[in-house]
Image (cartoon, rainbow, N blue to C red):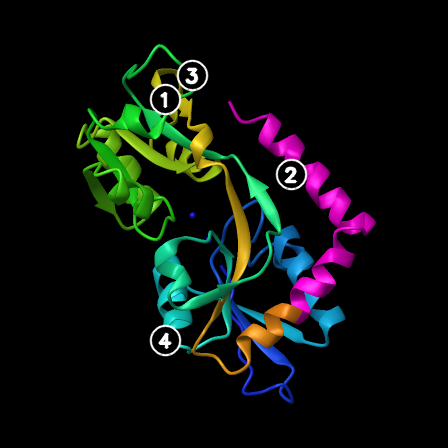
Amino acid sequence: VCIFTVHAANDQNKKLIIATENFVPLIGSHLEGNGPFAKIVTETFRKAGYEVEYKYFPWLRCEYMVKNGEVFAAIPYVKNKTRSNYAVFSNAILYDTSIKVFSFKKISTKNNLSIKDLKPLNIGAIAGYWYIEMLDEEKIIYDLSYGEEEAMKKLYNNRFDALICIYSNGMGMLYKLYPQEEKNLHVYSIPELKISYHVMASKNFPESEKIIEKFNAELVKTKNTSMYKSFISDYEKYQSQIK
C-alpha cells in the first residue's frame, strides 16, 4: 500500500531525502534510478529546483517519519483522512488497480467483489496498507500482519479466509513460500480499491506546502513528456496482465 521522504530545512536547502520501500515494479533499490515511479518523482523535483535522495525503510517507519517531520515526504502513498491530518499530498502521479483479494477457498462465484462482500469473511490485512482505514469505516474485522510473508503464511494455514494485498507482492510471496499451491489460489478484484499514488509530505516539515505546490506545477509538464507517457503505457500493460 506506499513511499518516499525528503529533507530540507528551508527553501535554501535544495536536497530532499526521500524515504521509501521496495515496491516492484514501481520502486526498488536494485532498479535503475530507484525504479520508474521514483524516476518520475526525481525528474519533477529536479525541474522544481530540488535534488532528491532515496532512503529505504519499512512502510510503517516511513509513515512515522513523515508524521513526525523527520523527513519531508514519503512515496508512493495513498491519500486518506488519517494521513491528511499530518501530511499534504501532491497531485496524483499514478492510478493503480492492482490491489486484489487472495484466497485458497472459493469465496465467491463473482470475479469482482465489493467491500461489503468481505463482511462475512475472516479477512487478513497488512499493516501500512491504506485500505485499513476503509475496513475500519465499514466495521470489517481483520487479522493484522506486519508484512506480506507473514500474511501469506497465515492465509495458507487458514488463519483467515482471504487476504487483501497488492497482486505482485502477494504472488511473489506465493512463489517464494508455496509455489505448488498456485493452482489452488483464487484471486478477486474489488473495483472500489482503485487508488492513486502521491508524494506524501509532512505538515511538520518546513515549507512543505510550498515545495509541493512547486512539484505540482512541474508535474503538469512532466505528464506531457515521452518519459511519463512511456511509464504509464508500460504500467497499463503490466496491470492488464493481472488476473
- First in sequence, mark 1 or 3: give its number: 3
Mark 2 Cα shell of 10 Å, populated few (<14), some (14-19), many (≥20) = some
Amino acid type, label 2: Tyr
Are the residues at dot 1 and dot 3 in contact (C-beta closer than 8 Å)?
Answer: no
Residue at mark 3: 111
Mark 3 Cα shell of 10 Å, populated few (<14), some (14-19), many (≥20) = few
The prevailing secondary structure element of the residues shown in magenta is: helix
- First in sequence, mark 3 or 4: give its number: 4
User: In front here: 235 or 190?
Assistant: 190
Q: Horizontally, is 9 left or right of 46 in the view? A: left
Q: Which residues are magenta?
A: 214-243
Residue at mark 1: 180
Residue at mark 2: 235
Is the residue 183 above or below the residue 34 in the image?
A: above
Return the x and y of residue 56 as percentages of the image width and height. Answer: 47, 64
Q: Alpha-carbon distance for marks 2 and 1? A: 28 Å
